[in-house]
Every structure is written in C-alpha cells, then in structure tokens.
Image (cartoon, rainbow, N blue to C red):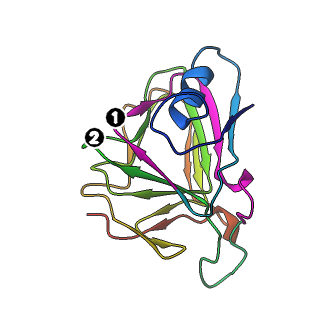
C-alpha cells in the first residue's frame, strides 16, 4: 500500500509518485490518501498512466464517506484531481493494467478517465458538479472513455448507493 500525503504534481508523497511505485510490479497495489484538508485538490500537469493492477481509494482519506442515500448522492469526497495542463488525466490502457477507482472527484480534462487493459471498476466517484463548495468542471468530451479493451471487464457504477458515480457537465 502507498499513501499519498500531499497535493503536489510530483515528488515524494504525490499521487504521481504513488502510481510510479505501483507500476513497478505486477501485484495489486493499493493507493490511499492522507491529505490535510477535505477537499484537497491535486492539480496535474501531465497524464498519469497505470501499467499494473492498481486500486485507488479516495474514501480512505478521513472524513470521506460513501454515498448511502437511495435518492441522492451524499458522499463526502476529499480527493479532487484537476487538470492544470491540457490532456488526459488517468489512463489504464495496456493489457496488464487494471484499475479500481473509488472516492475521487475530477475537474476539467478532455477525458478524465481512459480505460482499456484488463478489469476496471469505477465506483463512488464524481465528474463535474461541486465538492465541498469547490467547483468541478465537467469533461469537455467524455468523463469515462472505454477503449481498446482486449480482455477483462469494465464496471462503471453499480446497484448500491455507494457504487454510484456522479457525472455532470460532460459532453
């Protein structure tokens, strides 16, 4: 398990460093967050590419919580990933990559999330809208793009309230 402890684009404790560490092996790597504020904004200057099995868990950052409302989205999301420079934010495209992503909000981007590779699960996230009063700008193309899926499955959302994603303002 690797813990993200700051909102820097790169360097020790950053999400980029955590993904680089996760990409070293073929075993499942869990990335959690211990950021100082809720919400905290990670502004990315370039794309993040996942090349191995990775589980990114934004709900591990206190006081985050899953949605438990049957009729609305009342999750508390503490991790926001925002585009600072133009480009895709997070991609898992090669045949050995798989991504489980939950409890993260995305702001801006052409395509915030591009999936391919093996198995991918995207639950309890938010694309566009606002989190804790912080405006999230919708994707200019698609919030989630599934492409080049050679094997495996893709699950986007689910039947329980905690598995719902919110997608707002995407074209």
Categorize mark 2 by other alpha carbons within 10 Å: few (<14), some (14-19), many (20+). Answer: some
**Quarter-of-image position of residue 135:** bottom left
- Foreground label between 1 and 2: 1
Is 156 in the magenta? no
Decide: marks 1, 2 in contact (CB < 8 A)?
A: yes
- Depicted 86 relative to depicted 17: above or below: below
Q: Quadrant of the C terminus?
A: bottom left
Above-or-below relation of 28 to 26: below
Q: Is residue 53 visible?
A: yes
Q: Position of residue 124 (x, y in %)?
A: 61, 61
Q: Where's residue 13, x and y in %?
A: 61, 33
Which residues lie in the magenta part?
A: 41-65
Residue 90 is situated, as x and y percent measured from the top left of the image, at: 43, 39
Image point 47% across, 31% down: which residue? Answer: 10
In this rendering, the answer to whether 70 lies above or below 38 is: below
Identify which residue, 114 or 137, lies in the foreground.
Answer: 137
Q: Quadrant of the N terminus?
A: top right
Residue of label 1? 46
Q: Residue at x 60, y 77 (%)?
A: 73
Residue located 70% across and 20% down the image: 27
Q: Residues within 10 Å of mark 1 (few under 14, many from 20)?
A: some
Residue 46 among those drawn in magenta: yes
Q: Quadrant of residue 156?
A: bottom right
| 29 displayed left or right of 45 | right
Which disc, if any, is residue 87?
Answer: 2
Closest to the observer, 72 or 89 = 89
């Amino acid at each position: 398990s690797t813990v993200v402890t700051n909102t820097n684009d790169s360097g020790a404790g950053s999400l980029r460093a955590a993904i680089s560490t996760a990409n070293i092996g073929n075993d499942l790597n869990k990335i959690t967050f211990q950021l100082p504020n809720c919400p905290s904004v990670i502004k990315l200057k370039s794309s993040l590419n996942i090349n191995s099995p990775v589980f990114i868990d934004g709900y591990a950052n206190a006081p985050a919580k899953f949605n438990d409302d049957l009729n609305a989205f009342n999750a508390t999301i503490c991790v926001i990933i925002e585009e600072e420079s133009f480009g895709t934010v997070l991609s898992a495209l090669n045949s050995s990559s798989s991504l489980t992503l939950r409890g993260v909000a995305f702001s801006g981007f052409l395509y915030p999330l591009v999936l391919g590779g093996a198995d991918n699960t995207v639950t309890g996230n938010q694309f566009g809208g606002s989190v804790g009063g912080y405006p999230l700008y919708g994707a200019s193309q698609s919030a989630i793009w599934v492409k080049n899926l050679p094997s495996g499955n893709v699950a986007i959302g689910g039947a329980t309230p905690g598995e719902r994603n919110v997608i707002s303002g995407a074209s």
